[in-house]
Amino acid sequence: MASSPADAAAMAEAQEPGIRSKSSRPRQIPVIGVVTEDEEMQSVFKPMDLHRIITILEENDKDDSEEKQLKYVKKMVQCYQNGLPLRELTQIFKILNLCAIKVENQPRFIESVYEILKLCGLPFLKKKVSDEITYAEDTANAIALLGELMKIPSSELRIHICKCIIDFYHAEPPKKHIPGYQQASSSYKIKMAEVGGLAGRMVQSMILLENQLVEKLWVLKVLQHLSTSEVNCAVMLKAQAASRICAHLNDPDPSGQLLFRSSEILWNLLEKSSKEEIIQQLSNLECLLVLKEVFKNLFVRGFTHYDRQLRNDLLVITTIIAQNPGAPMIESGFTRDLILFATFNEVKSQNPLVKGLKLSNSYEDFELKKLLFNIIVILCKDLSTVQLLIDGKVVLALFTYVKKPEKQKIIEWSLAQHEELQLHAIATLSSVAPLLIEDYMSCQGNARILAFLEWCESQDPFFSHGNSFHGTGGRGNKFAQMRYTLRLLRAMVYLENETINTDLCEKGTIQQLIGIFKNAIREPNKKEEAIVLEIQSDILLILSGLCEHHIQRKEIFGTEGVDLILHVMKTDPKKLQSGLGYNVLFFSTLDSIWCCILGCYPSEDYFLEKEGIFLLLDVLSLNQKKFCNLILGIMVEFCDNPKTVAHVNAWRGKKDQTAASLLIKLWRKEEKELGVKRDKNGKIVDTKNPLFTSFQEEQRIMPLPANCPSIAVMDVAENIRAKIYAVLSKLDFENLPGLSAEDFVTLCIIHRYLDFKVGEIWNEIYEEIKMEKLIPVTSDRTILESITTASHNIGKMVVSLQSEMIESQARQDMQNEQKVYSKIQGTYKQRELANKSWENFLARTSNIKTLKKAKKLQEKAIESSKYSERPHNAICHRTVIKGLNTTVSSGPVVTAESTPVRLLGGPLADTDIALKKLPVQGGALQRVKAAKSLNEPKKNIPT
C-alpha cells in the first residue's frame, strides 16, 4: 500500500528511539534484553515537530487535510500523556486554539480539544530549575487562552475548559517519573493564572451565558476557586464581577447551586479585595432589588439549616451595602421589609408577608435577629429612614426588651439568648431613640429606663452569662445591662431636649444616679474595674448634661455630688496611665465640676472647704497637657468666688512650690512648645510681636471676612496662655508668693499679655488694610500708627524691666556667692587652727623639752592672769596641783559607784544604807575592791 511522503515523515516521528527504521542496510537480528529501563523512560517524550503540526493545522485547502490533522494531533496527545513541558507549552496551546477554532465547522476536532484539555490538567514539567521563571510569561499567556476559548459557542467545550481550570487546584501526581524532567510546583499553574488575568476573562464569559444554566454553574464554580486569591479578586473587580454575579442571584436554579456559589464568591471578594469598590458596584437598584427578592424568599420559605445560613450571609452583605449613603435602600423597598422583619416578633403586624411566621430559637434565627438589630442602626443614619422607623414602631419593639426578666413566663429564646438580645436592643435604642423623640416619650421611655436601672442596682438574684460582645465584663452581675442603659440615657440627655430632661429630673434621676455611683465606689470586685469606671464616667456625664445651666438642679446635686467628685479627684495619679478608663473618668469629673458645681455658691463653698482647689492644683502640677486646659478653665471660673484666692495662695506642691510658680512654669512650657522666641534668660526677643508663635510666623496675614477669626484671635483659644493670664490677674500680680527671679521675668510678659494681644490684633488689621490697598483717612491712620507704636513701646518697657530684674538677680547672686566663699574660708581657717593645735599637742607628748617649755608658758600665763595686789582679808587657794607633769588643765574628780548587793543583803534586807566614799589618788582613778567604814580617818582631797 502506497503512502505519501508526509505520512512517512509522521510515522518516522512517531517511532520510538529504541526501534530502528527500515533502511538499505542489511537486516540485523535484535538482541533480547539490551534495552535498559533508563532507555525506556527516555523514550516517553517522542521527538515531535510541533511547528510542523501547527503548519498542518493551518492548511485548509487539501481534501485529506482533516484526517491528517487529526492524526497528528492524536500522536501529539499520546506523546505528552505524562505532562506538558514548559518550553513547549506555547506551541501546545496554539495547537489547542487552532483545534478549538475548527470545532464549529469540523465537529470531529472536539475530541482532540478534549484530549488536549485533559493534558492541561497534568503537571507542567521543567528541565531546569529556572524554567519556571524563564517561561513564566509564555505560561501565563497560554493559561489565559483558556478564558478566550470560552467565547466559542460550544457547551461541552466550555464545561471541559472549566474542568481543566478546576484541576489546577486539585493537581494529580505524574503517572511516571520522567528522567531529565521535574514536576513544576503545585501552585505554579495557580500563580500563572493570576498573572495571565484568567479570572477577568472568566467573568467576562458570563455575559455569553445568560440563559445557559449548566455552563453558568461551571463558570461560577471556577470563579469560586479563583476568588480565593487576592490577585484574582482584584482582577475580577475590574471586570465588574460583584455587580454581574449579584444581578443573577435570583435566576431560576432548581439545584440551588447558583445562589450558594454566587454568595461564596461575593464573600471572597469582600474579604480579599477593596470593600469600598464592591459596595460601589452593588449599590445600584438592580442589585438591591435582586437581593431583596432572594432574601425575602429565604426568610419566608427557607426552613433548612442551609437556607438559614445562606439567608444570614446575604443579610451581612446587605448590611455592608447599607453603609453606603448612596445605596438606594429605600427606593428598592428593602429598608421597609428589613424593618418589618426586625420587629414583627415584638409588634404584631397584619402584613401578609409575616403572617403566621415565627422565629425559632435555633442558632441561625438568633444570629438573624442580631443582624436585623445591627442593620437598623446602620439604616437610621439616613434621616430619610426616620418615617419608616416610625411606621414600623421600632422604638416600641426595642423597648419590649428593656425590662427585668419575668419569672414563670415562657419565652421563645433561651436565657442566654434573651440576655444577649436585650443588650443588643438597648444598644440599638441608643442610636434610634434620639431620632424618634415623640415615639420615645409616648412609650414612657424615661420611666422604663429608670425602672430598669433600679432593677440593675437591686439585689435581685440574677445570673448573667456575659457571652456576647455586649455582655463583656458582665458575667454573674448586671453591669452589662447597667452600662448600656446608661449609654442610652446619656444619648437622650445630650439631645438637650428640655421636655426629656425635665421629666427625668422630676422622676428623681439625679438622686438615683448619685446612689448608683456610691454603690459603684463600694464595689470590691476588681475584675470588672474597667466596666465600673465606664459606668461612673457615664453617670457623671449624664449629671453634667442635666445640671448645666440650671441652678435648681445643681442644688439637688448638692454636697453628696460634690463628695463623689472629690472622691474621684483623690485617685492615685499613677492610675491615670493604667489604661482602664481612669482618664475618661477624670475628664468626666472635670466636666461635672464645670456643669454641676460652678455657679452654685453653696456647692462652690463646700468644694473649697473640702480642699477641692488643692486637688485641682495637684493634678495641674502633674504637667499632663490633656488636663491643663480644662483645669485652668475651671480655675478661672472659680476665681470669681472671693474665697478661692486664699485657697490658691495657700497651696504648696513639691519642694514648697506655690500656685503662682506652677502657673508661670506652665506658661514657659507652653511657649517653648509653641516656638515663641525668647532668649536664654526668658526675655522678649521681638518687641514688635512678643507673643508670636512659630505657626503665626509661618502663616502670612491674609484679608478675611469680618465673621472669620484671624490667626491672632484663634491663638487665644488654641493654647492655655490666656487662661493662665486670667488666673494670675485674679490672684493679683503684685502679691504672688514663692517666685524666683526667672518667674518674675516671665511674669512681666504675662502681666502685659492683654496689651500685647490687643496690639497684635491691631497690627493684623493694619496689615490687612495695606494688602487690600486701602488708604485710611488721616485721623484713622494716625490712630493706627499710635496704637502700633504704643504696643512696641510697651514691649521695650517690659524688656527694660526684665533686664533690671536680671541684673539685680545677678548682683544678689554675687553677694550670696561672696557669703558662701567667706563661710568656706572661715571653715578652712578653723581646720588649720585645729591642725596646728594637734601638732603642738603631739610635740609636747613626744618631746620633754617642749613639754617643759609649754609648762613654763602655762604657769606664766596663769600668774599674769592673777591680781597684782591681793584684796584685804582674802583667802588664797592654789589653783595648780604640785608635781603634775602635764599641761592639761586638771581639777578634783569624784567617782560614785552603787553599793554592792552583797553588802546590802538584797532588796528585802532591813538594813541602813551607809554612804561610802571612794578615795581619789594622784593620776588615774582606781576602783576600791572592798568597802571601808565611815569611821576610818579621812584623806585630804585636793580641791
Image (tube, rainbow, N blue to C red):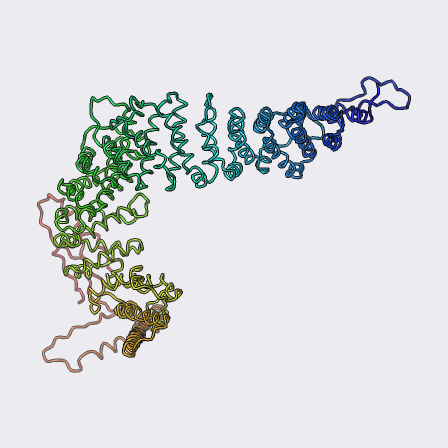
Task: Let me know if residue 640 appears in the view.
Answer: yes
How many numbered marks appear?
0
Q: Residue 14: x and y, percent?
A: 77, 24
Q: Residue 421: x and y, percent?
A: 29, 30
- The quarter of the picture where the C terminus appears is bottom left
Reply above or below: 20 against 747. Answer: above
Reply above or below: 310 against 872. Answer: above
Task: Say whether residue 325 is left or right of residue 105.
Answer: left
Q: Which of 218 and 532 is in front in this view?
A: 218
Q: Residue 17: x and y, percent?
A: 79, 25
Using the rendered view, name the quadrant where residue 186 is placed: top right
Task: Let me know if residue 801 appears in the view.
Answer: no
Identity of the residue drawn at 23% across and 42% down: 492
Using the rendered view, name the quadrant where residue 670 is placed: bottom left
Identity of the residue drawn at 54% across and 31% down: 208
Q: Nearer the viewer, residue 646 or 817?
A: 646
- The quarter of the picture where the N terminus appears is top right
Task: Say whether residue 321 is left or right of residue 380.
Answer: right
Reply above or below: 657 against 4. Answer: below
Task: Say whether residue 822 is left or right of residue 262.
Answer: left
Identity of the residue drawn at 32% across and 41% down: 382
Q: Residue 188: x and y, percent?
A: 60, 33
Q: Which of 194 and 213 is in front in this view?
A: 213
